[in-house]
Amino acid sequence: MILVVLSVVLLLVVGGCACVVWAARGGPPWTRAVATATLAAGELVRTSRRSGGRRGGGGDSDG
């Protein structure tokens, strides 16, 4: 079951990246919408990883 979920997530990521490239080359309007959603999701992941790293790293360096 986990393999199916991971496969679906991988397909969504690859499809989103393809839409980003296609929209940058002047694709149809729906690709721009998917590209915007993909870039926003990537920014959310990046932001959550940064904030998580600060919380975990701050306590370890005070030792």
Image (spheres, rainbow, N blue to C red):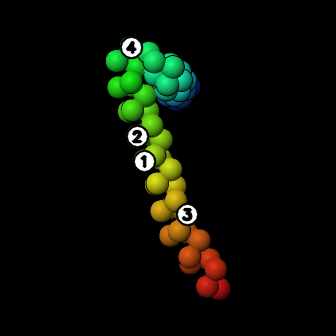
What amino acid is labelled 4 in the image? Pro
Circle 2 packing at 10 Å, graded few (<14), some (14-19), many (20+), is few
Q: Spatial distance from mark 4 to mark 1, Cα to Cα?
A: 25 Å
Element marked by disc 2: helix
- Secondary structure at badge 4 equals loop
Marks 4, 3: nearer the viewer: 4
Q: Secondary structure at mark 1?
A: helix
Which of the 4 image quarters holds residue 62? Answer: bottom right
User: How far separated are the C-alphas under marks 2 and 3?
Assistant: 20 Å
Q: Amino acid at mark 3?
A: Gly
Q: Which residue is mark 2?
A: 40
Q: Is residue 8 visible?
A: no
Cα separation, mark 3 vs mark 1, equals: 14 Å
Quickly name the residue at label 4: 28
Between 54 and 7, which is closer to the camera in this rendering? Answer: 54
- Asked if the residue at tag 2 contacts the one at tag 1, i.e. Cβ–Cβ closer than 8 Å, the answer is yes
Q: What amino acid is at disc 1?
A: Leu
Residue at image position (51%, 19%) is 25
Place of residue 55 in the rendered image (x, y in percent of width and height, measured from the top left): 50, 70
Give the labeled residue for mark 3. Answer: 53
What amino acid type should be assigned to the residue bearing mark 2? Ala
Mark-to-mark CA distance, 1 and 2: 6 Å
Mark with earlier residue (2, 3): 2
Residues packed near mark 3 inside 10 Å, few (<14), some (14 to 19) or many (20 plus): few
Q: Residues within 10 Å of mark 4 (few under 14, many from 20)?
A: few
